[in-house]
Image (cartoon, rainbow, N blue to C red):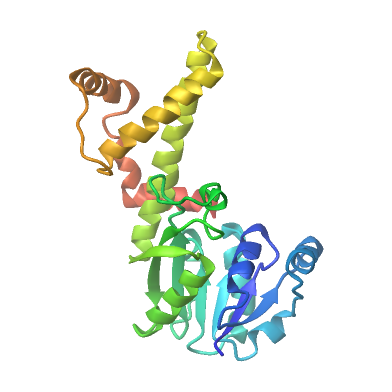
Amino acid sequence: MTSVALFGAGGKMGCRLTKNLKGSRFDVRHVEVSADGKARLERELGIGTVDVDQALDRVDVVILAVPDTAIGKVASSIEAKLRPGTMVIALDAAAPAAGHLPDRPDLTYFVTHPCHPPIFNDETDPHAKRDFFGGVAAKQHIVSALMQGPEEHYALGEEVAKVIWAPVMRSHRVTVEQIALLEPGLSETVCASLLVVMRQAMDECVARGVPKEAARDFLLGHLNVLGAVIFEETPGVFSDACNKAIEFGIPALMKDDWKKVFEPKQIADSIRRIT
């Protein structure tokens, strides 16, 4: 069996991965330093942990399910114990892109991240419809990158990714730099910020007298129909009035140079702030 050492197995993300790896073809060694994490693994999954040396003994794959700020420290602490050819998997592009992985050309570095369940989906099971993060019941797409290592290692990395993020629909192969454009660039700097503005706009309507439930229902319903048209989920066009509102709204809300957030320096600065 292919052996996998899962670091941070008892954390919030680690527990998600542990559940999905359970019953897979992989021989998983669970590593967790916190007492709470160890207790959570035992209580929720009936799984014990092993020490670092046991976990890394002739291991094939190491998954770093630890915070971005800890990846460099954890990776450096285990570097000397890793055999050439070992695959190290990071769950986010930030730390790898920032250069926090050890300078070991003989290791394989693989980066994977979930897209999360899409707004437009075919889920019918209530549990899946409420699985907003993914990796539990709702289907999702994923992105993965072979940062360094032999080309033939990509298949193993993608296989692990499909297990830990299951159930998976499309699996996209991209580069680490492209994942960084997607997050923090697209998903956090742009999408999360604009969604916060939308919430603030809803709150402003409420402050001006609109009942909160009515404002929320109106906004979320329009997000659905407007999003379906804008992202080509359904054919359609906006009314002349809507197009005129957009023509006025974009310059009123956005700076002319807002796309500079995707420039390499801006992405690098964003990564530096979170790692």
Q: Position of residue 33 (x, y in %)?
A: 75, 68
Q: Position of residue 147 (x, y in %)?
A: 39, 72
Taking the image as drawn, is residue 200 in sight? Answer: no
Assign the N terminus to one quadrant of the image. bottom right
**Vertical placement of 114 versus 80: above or below?**
above
Residue at image point 64% right, 85% down: 56
Residue at image point 52% right, 48% down: 132
- Using the image as rendered, state which of residue 109 and residue 46 is in the foreground: 46
Identify the residue at the far top of this view.
Answer: 209
| 173 sits to left or right of 212 | left
Assign the C terminus to one quadrant of the image. bottom right
Q: Position of residue 231 (x, y in %)?
A: 28, 42
- Using the image as rendered, state which of residue 217 and residue 85 is in the foreground: 217
Q: Position of residue 200 (x, y in %)?
A: 49, 23
| 197 sits to left or right of 175 | right
- Using the image as rendered, state which of residue 18 and residue 148 is in the foreground: 18
| 130 sits to left or right of 266 | right
Taking the image as drawn, is residue 28 in sight? Answer: yes
**Vertical placement of 85 versus 260: above or below?**
below
- Using the image as rendered, state which of residue 152 and residue 210 is in the foreground: 210
**Vertical placement of 132 versus 23: above or below?**
above
| 89 sits to left or right of 16 | left
Residue at image point 19% right, 31% down: 237
